[in-house]
Amino acid sequence: MAEHEQVHEHVRVAVVGSGFGGLGAAVRLRREGITDFVVLERSDSVGGTWRDNSYPGCACDVPSHLYSFSFAPNPEWPRTFSGQEHIRAYLEHVTDTFGLRPHIRFDSEVKRMAWDAEQLRWEIETVSGTLTADVVVSATGPLSDPKVPDIPGLDSFPGKVFHSARWDHDHDLTGKRVAMIGTGASAIQIVPAIQPKVGRLTLFQRTPAWVMPRMDRAISGAERALHRALPVTTKLRRGLLWGIRELQVQAFTKHPNELGFVEQIAKRNMASAIKDPALRAKLTPDYRIGCKRILLSSEYYPALARPNVDVVTGGLSEVRGSTLVAADGTEAEADVIIFGTGFHVTDMPISERVVGADGRTLAETWKGGMEALRGASAAGFPNWMTIIGPNTGLGNSSMILMIESQLNYMADYLRQLRVLGGRAALDARPTAVRNWNHRVQERMKRTVWNTGGCTSWYLDPSGRNTTIWPGTTAEFRRATRRVNLAEYQVLRPAAAEPAAVADAGAADANADAAAEVGA
């Protein structure tokens, strides 16, 4: 799009990413009457993680009617748990229904964003050109950049290697010796999808997962017709799904021992398919269910019981040509290596490209761990907000609920800037960020994610949980329904400096009381 490559273009808001977070932000901006915005997308189509993850068997583990925008209900979901192709089609539909395509700049990966303290705006460099923006909304998401472990000898492997999020559909797995590395949400979907066609499948398992039966079914034509004729029934269905998950939260956040009965269900799910006691022992976790994300599958265990599948414990430690060596010394030959090893979540690569008011990158600021006021604003990065930021993840419900809460916060943030008038910016106060984060971490101490006895991708290298929200989605919605200016410093151009200082002094007295969690 040559017309978008002008060097001096300026917009009110620049949104980065066109997954659920970015598209949701774009819709909300239009509903707020803001049309002076762009969505910067590094790929050639929308969809985010649901565009990138197209591996066999890819599907959502949250019910369809809950894993969709409340403002864009879909009465046509074909299954109770939607497949990747249906979710991606839904996001394309949202893009067209709300007229977002004119705002989207495809093939425009952000290379650098730097705050201009004099002009009170962001200078943004993309692969397709540069622009400036008053406000940046970063919606790149935590599941956007695949993580491949540094395995000695991997470079010498003569066969095919790829990550589940970069599936090579041109490579035929029929009859091949395939090594699946990892036992997370992607792996348990890939294994049963490819097991029937491969010659031999070796699963390298570092830690076994708790797997519950997946109660998936086709949604009947009568149900879909009812939802079309009476939209309120779609809302009722969504509300019921939401309510059930809200009631489960206390077991995860306050009473992890109550999850024992759930473990029994998972064990029965395993026992029904795995008859070999030795294999069952390999697949039984030694940590509390919920510590890692609870996985859903009714096909995973039956696939592992097939004669052409081997489960190797200890994880992959070395590659010697076509021989893969596990941590326990077990060796296996492979023609293809598939990594289902997750993403850069606590070290998001976008943070290395964002330069704040003091010249430091967001990655440098977050060196000791990610933290942001109400999951959105980082101190020292004025008029920069993130969607699905630190401690906004969920362990048992739909992230769309959290995204919509953050969109409420974004909308009020922009309203506050409008009310302030003139050229202004908001910078989260370090005290407000610290207080918010302290209270989140205090609540985190008794959750299953911190006490369950596992090591998960929820934790950063120091062992701190910087990803999960330790409460209900309703609590988070209340905490993000409006911006409290006492938690921010109001920045003005240099000529208006005295007023900004006065604002800062008045707000300081209230900052501690305002930095609350789930009020």
Image: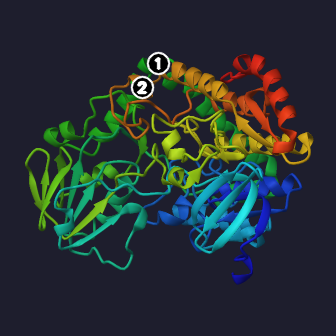
Q: Amino acid at mark 2?
A: Asn
Residue ID at (47%, 23%):
447
Q: Which residue is mark 1?
A: 446
Q: Which SS class for mark 2?
A: helix
Report x, y in % for residue 259: 43, 24
Label 1, secondary structure: give it. Answer: loop
Is 243 in front, or is 142?
142
Residue occupying image coordinates x 42% and y 25%: 450
Give the x, y percent position of residue 3.
74, 81
The number of discs equals 2
The one nearer the camera, 77 or 398, is: 398
Report if the CB atoms under discs 1 and 2 are less than 8 Å apart.
Answer: yes
Residue 154 is situated, as x and y percent measured from the top left of the image, at: 20, 63
Query: Where is residue 35 drawn, in percent x and y?
Result: 85, 62
90 left or right of 275 in image: right
Q: Which residue is denoted by mark 2 in the rendering?
A: 450
* 142, above or below 393, in the image: below
Q: Residue at x 54, y 55 (%)?
A: 353
Instruction: Examine the rendering and report whether any part of residue 439 can be seen.
Output: yes
Which amino acid, by three-letter code, is at mark 1? Arg
